Image (cartoon, rainbow, N blue to C red):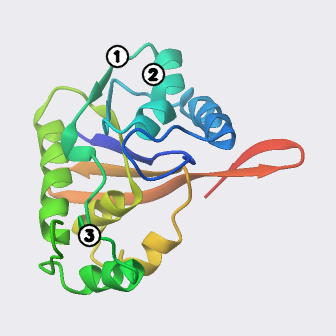
Amino acid sequence: MEKRVYVVRHCEAEGQPSEAHLTEMGFRQAAALAQFFIEEKVERIISSPFLRAVQSIEPTATRKGVQMETDDRLAERILSTQVLDDWLVKLEATFADLELKFAGGESSREAMNRIVSVVEEILEGEAVDTLIVTHGNLMSLLLHHYQPSFGFEEWKNLGNPDVFLLKFREDHVTIEHIWRFKENLNGFRSTD
C-alpha cells in the first residue's frame, strides 16, 4: 500500500521566534494553501508547535475537518544559541558536514533524525495521507534524507509556503515538488 506525506513549509511570518505571527501576506498564503488542499485527501495533520506553522495550516484543517496535532520534533532547528554574524556560511557548512555542531545548537544529523522519526511513525500508523507542517531548514534535511542531492542551494530556493509530496511504496520513496505560492495582480496561482 502506498502512503503519502505532504511536507509543508510555513507561510510568511513576522520573524523567527516561536511566537512570531504570520504577516498579512502570510495569512493570504494560508488561505491559498487551504484552497490548494481542498482537492487533496488528508486524514491527519501534524504541525510544528511554532505559531507561524500552526497559523499556516489552521485554514486547511478547518476546511478539511481534520483535527490538527502538534509535535515538538517538527520545530525549527536551532543552529546555535549564540548570535552568529556569519550564520548563512555556518548553515551551508552543516549541509556539507551533517555532524557539524555549533554552541547550543544541533547538528544537521540530529535535526534530520528527529523529523525522520516523525515520518517513520506516520508510516507505521493507519493514515494513508498525512500532512506535516514544519520549517525550511528541517524540511530540507528531511528531503535530503530521502534524496541526498537536496542540499543548501535547494534550501535557499524554498518559498513560503512550499509543498512537497513524499510517496512511500514498500522500500521506494518518490519526492515531488507539488506547489509553491505565487501571487500576481489577478490573485493567487500555484506553480510546480
The residue singled out by tag 3 in the image is 82
* Residue shown at the point (18%, 66%) measured from the top left: 105
Q: Is residue 104 left or right of residue 152?
A: left
Badge 1: residue crowd in 10 Å (few <14, some 14–19, many ≥20): few
48 w.r.t. 152: above or below: above
Give yes or no for contact between labels 3 and 1 (Cβ–Cβ under 8 Å).
no
Which residue is more in the foreground, 140 or 108?
A: 108
The numbered disc on residue 61 is 2
Q: Nearer the viewer, mark 3 or mark 1?
A: 3
79, 58: nearer the viewer: 79
Amino acid tagged 1: Gln
Q: Quadrant of residue 27?
A: top right
Q: Secondary structure at mark 3?
A: loop
Please give the name of the residue rendered at 53% of the width and 17% of the height, measured from the top-left corner. Answer: 63
Against 171, residue 82 (above or below) is below
31 left or right, relative to 92: right
For disc 2, the neighbor class at 10 Å (few under 14, some 14 to 19, many from 20) is many
Q: CA distance from mark 3 to mark 2?
A: 36 Å
Could you say where residue 56 lies in the image, as x and y percent from the top left? 50, 35
- Count of number-bearing discs: 3
- Which one is earlier in the sequence, the residue at label 3 or at label 1? 1
In terms of sequence position, does the residue under pointer 2 or pointer 1 come before the other?
2
- What whole-number distance in Å separates the C-alpha atoms at marks 3 and 1? 36 Å
Residue at the spot of label 1: 67
Q: State which quadrant residue 28 falls in.
A: top right
Q: Hey, what amino acid is under mark 3?
A: Gln
